[in-house]
Image (cartoon, helix red, strand yellow):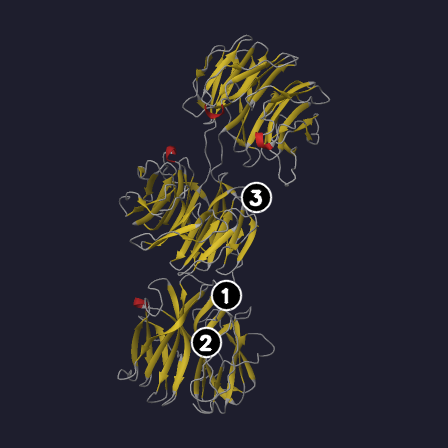
Amino acid sequence: MKGQTVANQVITKVDSTSDVSLYNGVSAADLIVDVTGYYPTGSTYHPLTPARALDTRPGSEPTAKSVTKLTLAGKAGVPTTGVAAVVLNVTAVDPAEPGFVTVYPAGVARPTASNLNYAKGGVVPAMVIAKLGTGGAIDLYTLAKSDLVVDVVGWIPSGTDYQALTPARLLDTRTGLGAPAQKVRGNTQITLQVAGHGGVPATGVAAVEVNVTVVGPSQAGFVTAFSGGEPVHPVTSTLNYAAGQIVANSATVPLSSEGTLDLYTGWGTTDLVVDVVGYWGTTHTGLEWEPPASIDPAQGIPQSISCPTTTFCAAVDARGNVLTYDGTAWSAPRKINGDTVFSSVSCPTPDFCVAVDQFGTALTYNGDTWSAQFVGHVTSWLTYTSMNSVSCPTKNFCVAVDNYGYASTYNGVAWSPSAKIDSYGTAAVGGIPSVSCASATFCTAVDGAGYALTFNGSRWSAPTKVDPNGRLNRVSCPSSNFCIAVDPLGNAFTWGGTKWSTSVKVDSNTTNHGLASVSCPTTTFCAAVDGAGNALTYDGGSWTAPESVATHTGGFTSVSCPTTGACVAVDVAGDSFRYDAATWSTRTSFDPVLGYLGSVSCPTTTYCVALDPYGRMLTWNGSAWADGPDTLPPTTRMASVSCPTTTFCAAVGSLGQAATFDGTKWSTPTKLAANDSLRSVSCPTSTFCVAVGKARNGYTFNGTTWSAATRIDPSSNDDGLVSVSCVSASFCVAAQRIGSGVVTFDGSSWAAPVAVDPDGGTITSISCATASFCVAVDQDGNAVVYNGTSWSKPHKVGYGAQFTSVSCPTAGFCAAVTAMGDAYTFDGVNWQGPTSVDARRYLASVSCSARSVCLAVDSDGSAVVGRQG
């Protein structure tokens, strides 16, 4: 209207140069623009090119005190589902009398609130952020007869930081609500308590969306709404008015730490009315992670055994455990060094042992406790060498060798600095895989290039070529005049005190690294075992034929013989076999593979399910873990589990099998594919699941049965699909492991792959909170975000971060974990981290039922809980 000062809140897109355009329709006017906030690129707000959703002109003018229902879901660019609120410009055109318009969710009672106020005959616009109601619709109530125009300018997804409310009145100085029942004087600043009122939480609120109205001002003026507690009001205005008018405008106002906002009135006196229509949660500050809890202790894959007597043996495994044997029975696994991979153990007596691992550490046993010391070599790349082997002929002397050709000696008190002893034993050939010391003045080491070298108590000899075929695996020396070395091709070589013999073929079974271990307690007796489960013995002159002993398990790893005719051998399945004079015993299971927690799923904040590949199920009740009510066969090798509810889960495994859980029991596993390794499953409901795997196929579950394989990735990607996430039966996204692409399902078919991560190239996990919000992470520390239309460019979240899993319970929050025990969080705009939550352990999976609670599980059988502080 001519001569007026009119304000309106606007949320608008910027162009490629970050500019906006303002068009003045008819007559000349001064323009003032105040910036009150912004949405970053990639944020959860979805701006739209304005689209008209309602125009009652001509002939459909709403009558006085009428309600007009307007369905917006699925129209004007607004999705059919997953919408928390819509951003509108609502205009009253040519009202018959003064009045107001109230916009509120369809299906609820009309609140005592207004979004815009008008005088007779005017044209009054107002921006409105409105919550959708029944049927994805809003209701518009007009007090007087008036045409209504509604333009849609954007929408906010469900699950974001913004929470839409049914409008509620917080302040009305006409009645004394929120302030004394009197007009507010000009040049006055009043404080309004917002947090804890009108549906706004008492804490955790960053800003509110309000509608501010002036009623009956004594003269022209303005109102400014701003964060409470500020000593000086901003030089901006929220709304402007002339004398006697009723004027409303929406405003996004940050709250003070006390949950208040302030209102400044410029001139004259006026009544003020404030209605709240929504709020934004505080900026995400990450998760506070509890210490790891061991819930499924990892064990298995014995690597080495040492038996100084027939009534004592110590074995170490690939999961950081030591186990002891008393001649009759084995002890339970005992974790002595986290989830390290032990490579060798040597015990000259029952009360002294040394074990070395692949992180360059030596652990010494004194008959009671184990103590650790780093003995490895730090390479030029600032990585640690892996200790391959250790030999201790006495408590006061040991030698340990590594995968770079270095050796370190122990004098009964401390280890010497590592020194290079073998120029041929490089990392490329595995360094020095074995050392054996008959005494403190004689040791022999063999390397991966086929060389051997000896130690005389003060120095090492130059390497001597022994095996023309290359790698030597193991060596055993009971004296300075006798050693036996073996290689992967089944050959044995004998040291006679001055030189090595030529090769003797003793084992034609060269499967799984051929001869894996040899032990010679004397010059007239040795035992050797191979990777195919065979054992053979030496009598000082010749070798017996290989005897099949452990063929069902995948092969032997180590053998130790304290005396002639007495040996104990261990295999990869965690079985031990005892040799007594001439026969091998049947197997004794003492260290079966258990405890690699590969997947976790949390449908609620008080229920999670974790599975290990060997069939064990564990459940979490919000505070403690317990064994689940049922187990799965260990042969299924389950790799992924998805639980949409507490009474339904689906699991798939690397051997192509799937099973479902009904809250009490698991179904009998079903073979979905003979030649497919299933890696991931996602179930938004108990009647719809999708599983994907290495063969690039998809399999769907309808609540009863699984479908046949459907090729969903037509590319030549040899490593197939690694992860899938479904938010409904009509929207899923599956990620390629190699090829940097994703394929999307719309309820009936899968689209062609779209490249989203060309920089990283190896996606490891994907999670979708809604059909308009997905995040994928890769092994190079990158993340890409989907906004419902397109994928962002890869963003480097953490240099060196090897992401393994990501979980997004809402469109405004994700948690991701890495192979080095770190966690990151995402608030829809920014990533935070890394936070070390499980030092040096491989975090395999994370699941967040809400932004307030996440659980991660690791390769050592531990679980970590993260809670929002």
Question: Which quarter of the picture shows residue 526?
Answer: top right
Above or below, 181 relative to 227: below
Q: Which of 221 and 388 lies nearest the eye of the viewer?
A: 388
Question: Which quarter of the picture shows residue 499?
Answer: top right
Disc 2 versus disc 1: distance between alpha carbons?
A: 16 Å
Residue located 36% across and 81% down the image: 101
The amino acid at mark 2 is Val
| Circle 1 SS class | loop
| Circle 3 SS class | loop
Q: Earlier in the sequence, mark 1 or mark 3?
A: 1
* Residue 32 horizontal/vertical position (percent): 52, 82
Left or right of residue 210: residue 66? left
Q: Earlier in the sequence, mark 2 or mark 1?
A: 2
Neighbourhood count class around disc 1 (C-alpha, 10 Å): few under 14, some 14–19, many 20 upward? few
Neighbourhood count class around disc 3 (C-alpha, 10 Å): few under 14, some 14–19, many 20 upward? some
Q: Is residue 747 visible?
A: yes
Residue located 45% across and 76% down the image: 10
The amino acid at mark 1 is Pro
Residue 839: assigned label: 3
Disc 1 versus disc 3: distance between alpha carbons?
A: 34 Å
The amino acid at mark 3 is Ala
The residue that label 2 is drawn on is 10
Left or right of residue 741: residue 703? left
Q: Are marks 1 and 3 in contact (CB under 8 Å)?
A: no
Q: Which of 105 and 523 lies nearest the eye of the viewer?
A: 523
* Residue 411 horizontal/vertical position (percent): 71, 25
